[in-house]
Amino acid sequence: MENRGVLIGGIVFVFGAFVLMISLLVYESYKAKQMKALAASIKTEARPAPTSAPALDYSMYKTKIGDEGRDMVQVPDGPFIMGSKDGDPDEVPERQVFLGAFYIDKKEVSQEEYARFAKMTKRQLPKIEVFEDDQSKLLQPEFAAMSMSWDEAAAYCKWAGKRLPTEAEWEKAGRGEGKRKYAWGDNVRNGRANANLDGSEDGYRYLAPPGSFEHGRSPYGIYDMTGNVAEWVADSYDEHYYQKAPYRDPKGPDRADLKVVRGGSWRETEHNARLSKRFAAKAWRTDITIGFRCASDVEASDSPAPS
């Protein structure tokens, strides 16, 4: 009788141990799945949000390498719609403007590229005057250049054998011949720009390397016309300039201390990141949200040979 009790107890122990082992295996498997899901959900500051949009073909637009070795895209001549009747008072009237062909940088100037210019021309690097976080989060060679004045941006373009784009050239390069709000279209879309458009993550807390958003390119294949850094353009600012501007190749009013900034930055809202939005800033202003890109005229040697 005693041996029988021992046998039953042994069986119960073995069965219990087996059930416990199975339970532990199930728990560990569940835990591993949870950790995997958590790891997949984490977004780093250096990884743009994924997008399922198909890649577009921009090969029909002519390109060239600028004197300083940067890629440029030719925007063809023709009319486009400038301004917006649904925007701010200085964006009206919405009107048709005709521009001759021109080249514009495919990407914004990077900090590394600006540092090369500063070294060769014995200029000081831009200084960050106000930033509440760690400045090293902004100062990375691959990030967009920022915190230079209008004159410094213009000097870089001149050194590179180029110039700052006019306000009209900048807007056409960003929106094409239509009336799109953003470089990719009319609707806010996640993963298209380094900007605070809808509160969702874009993969970067502050600046991003120029060209990080493949699916946010303009109709001509130009990067970061929406977001990242806002950009100096050549024009002086006049709130009412659109009401008196010429139809062909407008270049802005006479030089004044107020200059135009375009494109919105990494911290802009949906409204302020629109392609027709105009900002005014003192020419001497330096800001961590303002950078630039350059443009150039189309020379006879740039045009295709007649057939």
Image (cartoon, rainbow, N blue to C red):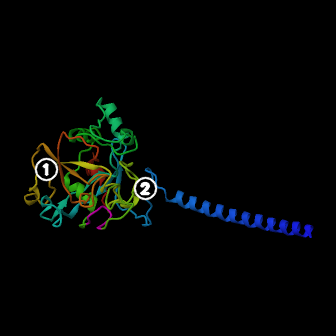
Residue 125 in the image, given as x and y percentages of width and height: 31, 34
Answer left or right for 102 relative to 18.
Answer: left
For the record, the magenta segment spans: 180-186
How far apart are the two marked residues, 2 and 1, measured between alpha carbons? 34 Å
Q: Is residue 282 above or below residue 58?
A: above
Q: Is residue 136 magenta-colored?
A: no
Out of 98 and 233, give the one closest to the viewer. 233
Residue at 44% in and 66% down: 52
Q: Residue furthest front?
A: 1
Out of 253 and 86, give the one closest to the viewer. 86
**Label 2's element?**
loop
Point out which mark residue 237 bears. 1
Residue at 76% in and 66% down: 16
Residue 189 in the image, given as x and y percentages of width and height: 35, 65
Residue 4 in the image, given as x and y percentages of width and height: 90, 70
User: Which residue position is annotated with label 2?
Assistant: 48
- The kind of secondary structure the magenta stretch mainly shows is loop
Residue at 25% in and 41% down: 153
